[in-house]
Amino acid sequence: MQITTYFTKHTNVKKIILDLLDTANTQVNVAVAWFTEPLLFSKLLEIQDRGVNVELIVTSHDFNRKSPNDYSLIEENGGFFTEIGNDEQLMHMKFCVIDFKTVISGSANWSKSAFTKHNEEVTVVQDNLSRSNDFMAEFQRLKELSGKIKDIQKDLDISRALKTFEVIKALINIGDTHALQPYIYQLKDIPEIEPITNHLIAGNYTAAVSEIDLFKINYTQIVSVNE
């Protein structure tokens, strides 16, 4: 695990975030109250072009709506975008999770003022699975709060879960558990398999495999009876 803290009056924090986003291979989740910085937004679009899935949540406020960033492009490129909160109950988060293993958090919004005028702090924690899971759980909660996650649930089905289970079991068998996170969060929105995803997130891989095998047996029996 590596922990590094930066202060905007001493370090070019925006460049550090841009460089970290460049390292993304599979997934980037961003939840920031104010996101008006065009270079960071362009970087999200850039990494989407090379196949990285990007999910973005901002505060529902005119400050964001009047920014130069066209948030709809995130969804046009196959990602997820929503805005939540209001003046009385702000979505005041400022964090980013890269590939389920690097967490960027702190006081700084992704705005020009945060990186040039204000006294802000940003901390980067790498290779701490517990911290990554905590922030991903909070991102998931915000997605559910937005209501848009219901549309995503319609696109996820048991057939896809069964195929993903095979990949997950193969990775567990070869001991490559660090590669599991993208597959786990692909299944996180399916209520029927929540006990399995909970075991996987907690690192209880033996219990998860047992639950997977039991689920497959039960599901096969249901399909057989229906047919």
Image (cartoon, rainbow, N blue to C red):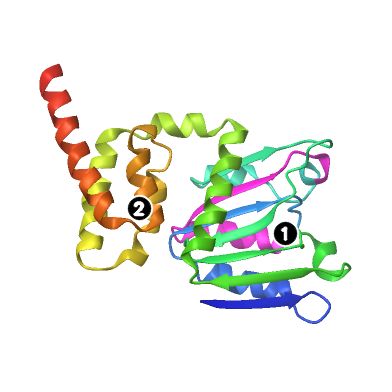
Q: Residue furthest top?
A: 226
- For label 2, the SS is helix
* 136 with respect to 33 (left or right): left
In the image, farthest residue toward the right: 117
Label 2 crowding class (10 Å Cα cut-off): few <14, some 14-19, many 20+? many
Q: Is residue 158 visible?
A: yes
Which residue is drawn at the image coordinates 70% and 52% (left, top)? 93
Q: Horizontal and vertical percent for residue 20?
A: 57, 71
Q: Position of residue 153 (x, y in %)?
A: 43, 32
Q: Is residue 101 above or below residue 30?
A: below
User: Quarter of the image holding residue 193?
Assistant: top left
The residue positioned 61% from the left and 59% from the top of the image is 96
- Left or right of 119 in this view: 1: left
Q: Could you give the CA–CA distance between mark 1 and mark 2, rounded to whole angstroms? A: 37 Å
Tag of residue 200: 2
Furthest toward the bottom, the residue is: 10
User: Please, what is the three-letter code of the amino acid marked with disc 1?
Assistant: Pro
Percent coordinates x, y for residue 54 in the rendering: 53, 53
Closer to the eye: label 1 or 2: 2
First to last magenta residue range: 39-63
| Residue at screen point 65% across, 58% down | 95
Asked whether the beta carbons under mark 1 and mark 2 sit within 8 Å of each other, the answer is no
Q: Which image quarter holds the C terminus?
A: top left
Residue picked out by circle 1: 38
The answer to if 210 sits in the magenta stretch is no
